[in-house]
Amino acid sequence: MKHISSFSDKKLINRDTYLSFANTNEEHIVLPIKGIVVEFPGLGGSSCLGGSIDMKSYSAEHTIDYGRNGIIIAYVFPGPWSWGNRGAVRIADAVVDALFEKYDLNADTSVAVCGGSMGGLGAMMYAIHSRYEVSIVAAACPCTDALDRMWAHPEFPRTYISAVATYDAPLEDGLKEISPIYRISDMPKTKYFICSDEEDEVFPEEQCDVFVEKLKEAGHQVEYYKQPGKRHGEFYPEIRQKLYDAIKNAII
């Protein structure tokens, strides 16, 4: 069941205001627009492609190249402790709505989603709950089981509980609702790009292995890369490039 309301939020989040809710690479855009990438931040504002929670143009190496290829990327600001909750999806959808309106995009314009760590979880929750069908979900070192990892880091308990405290459900059920491992049957049939870190100290690679296997068993198309010797959030340059290319190829 989707939790996003059918009414419009554009009175507050619209083509004139959306840059208060996301950083974009629009200054590098070469028209026509071929697609939109929504990127969710990690806890504390980490990013797969060089995004920042400071309000400014999204002008990293890969995002500049996206712009030259007619792809807008929006690094959304859903709140620092969002963990892919309903509010995070609602804000991201409103930003995408604003971009569709600003550029008068066709309904079939591609929308992709990505993120790392908390942002990887957010990307998967967005794929489930968004009003938009996503062309690819790209997640790096994602949290797949919030309930299991609640005590894995000193910052996690307060942030996880903050994310689901307003849900009309026991906190345990709220954590399951934002945990991809419990949502396999709800994951949309689309492309998935997932990478994990062998030495991940907060979201063990073994949990990512199990999640990917369950996705494949459910019939999903998954491109999966493991990164030997890497700790949480680290990338081999060639794997980051594969993530970038997978998103680009799913749109163009």
Image: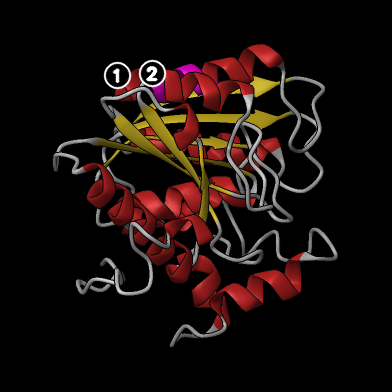
Q: Nearer the viewer, residue 133 or 29?
A: 29
Q: Nearer the viewer, residue 203 or 8?
A: 8
In three-dimensional space, the C-alpha distance between marks 1 and 2, rounded to whole angstroms, equals 8 Å
Q: Nearer the viewer, residue 30 or 248?
A: 30
Indicate whether 230 appears above or below 82. above
| Residue at image location 72% in from the left, 24% down from the top | 235
Tag shown at residue 48: none
Query: Does 201 sit left or right of 54 as displayed?
Result: right
Tag shown at residue 252: 1
Question: Disc 2 residue type?
Answer: Asn
> Of circles 1 and 2, which is in front?
2
Q: Quadrant of residue 7?
A: bottom left
Q: Is residue 186 visible?
A: no
> Magenta residues?
243-248
Give the crowd class for mark 1: few <14, some 14-19, many >=20 residues within 10 Å: few
In which quadrant is the C terminus drawn?
top left
Q: Is residue 218 visible?
A: yes
| Residue at image location 75% in from the left, 65% down from the top | 156
Tag shown at residue 69: 2
In which quadrant is the N terminus drawn?
bottom left
| Residue at image location 74% in from the left, 55% down from the top | 44
Give the x, y percent position of residue 155: 80, 65
Indicate whether 25 appears above or below 17. above
Indicate whether 204 appears above or below 34. below
Q: Quadrant of residue 111?
A: top left
Question: Disc 1 residue type?
Answer: Ile
Which residue in the rendered view is the most extreme toward the top? Answer: 238
Q: Please say whether residue 127 is one of the residues in the magenta stretch.
A: no
Nearer-N-terminus badge (1/2): 2
